[in-house]
Image (cartoon, grey):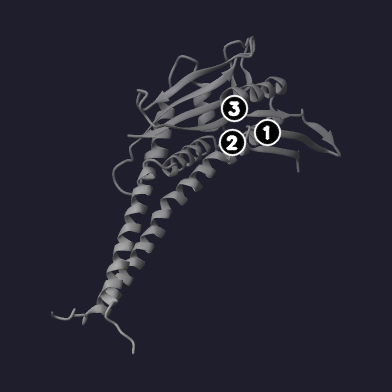
Amino acid sequence: MARLNDDAQWIILMGFLISFSFFFLALVINQSTIVGQTTAESVIEFPKNDIRDVRGVIISSVNVTNPDIVRSDITVISLNRKNAVVNFTPPQIKDNHTVINIHYNNGVTEFNENWTSL
Amino acid sequence: MLNTDGQLYTIEGFAAALIMIATAYLVVNATSVYTAGDTHISDMQLEALGIDALKVMDTNESHLSKSPLRDIIEGTPPGAQNATFGANFWYLINNRTQSGADHIQYTASYSYRNTTDNSVSSAFINASRNLSGGEHAVRATKWVVVNKQLPGDSAAHDRAVLVEVLMWRD
């Protein structure tokens, strides 16, 4: 009986090692979509632009002609259209600065600020 | 003395093991394949683009002039529509450095509070295409303070309204 020929064993072994490492590199690349997914989800979920926007309109409501109506506009529309509870005090003058306490809560993110004019 | 007779069989065994592990991995993973269309990456980019475009439109050139967005809302009574918004907004979201525009569609409205019963209504502004219900749309919003007579008001005065834009690609 002819003996098993094992001349090329090391070449075959190296071939397997290299292809195995390629397989694991492919797994790492495969994770990139999931990383992008979770990052995008947290960017969407965190209401950075909503908070900046509502904060901006609250501060600009200091200079309107009928502040009470504008203040209810902000509170009512925030709850209706943005699912966010927004509450803030009328502007108060303290030491020649205008002060507003701003509260924002959309059920996930809460934001509180004690705004003081410069 | 070291005997190397079994090496090929060992390698064959390893190869078989690797193939089995790889198969099992692919089978288990096949239940949760993420493609670019499934992820929220494009949603996030579209939403950021819309918010930026609305911010640009709500920026006034000087403190003496009104922002384009404010002008548009003050000139659009509930029930009417405004083509100026369409031209500005469409240009901001679809303009590209290369020739040929992007394919982002939108429909825009603004929400206001009725002072008599505290209800919130929406007034249409403009749309590049009608919603059919099958779009995968994202929403971008912007608060705008306008001087306008809204339903329930006896005269024009300062009001806060929320501009809402639904955007999608087709």
The percent coordinates of residue A26 (x first, y second) are: 36, 60
- The quadrant of the image that shows the C terminus of chain A is top right
Real-space Cα separation, disc 3 to disc 2, in angstroms? 11 Å
| Secondary structure at numbered mark 3 | loop
Taking the spot 84% from the left edge, 38% from the top edge, the residue there is A96
Vertical placement of residue A118 versus B67, above or below: below
> Given the image, what chain letter belongs to the residue carrying mark 2?
A
Give the numbered dot on residue A83: 3
> Given the image, what chain letter belongs to the residue carrying mark 1?
A
| Along the line of sight, the residue nearer the viewer: A66 or A69 | A69
Real-space Cα separation, disc 1 to disc 3, in angstroms? 11 Å
Residue under pointer 2: A50
* Crowdedness near tag 1: few (<14), some (14–19) or many (≥20) residues, C-alpha within 10 Å: many
* Crowdedness near tag 3: few (<14), some (14–19) or many (≥20) residues, C-alpha within 10 Å: few
Taking the spot 29% from the left edge, 75% from the top edge, the residue there is A13
Which of the marked residues, 2 or 1, is nearer the chain's N terminus? 2
- The quadrant of the image that shows the N terminus of chain A is bottom left
Q: Hey, what amino acid is under mark 3?
A: Asn
Q: Is residue A115 left or right of residue B130?
A: right
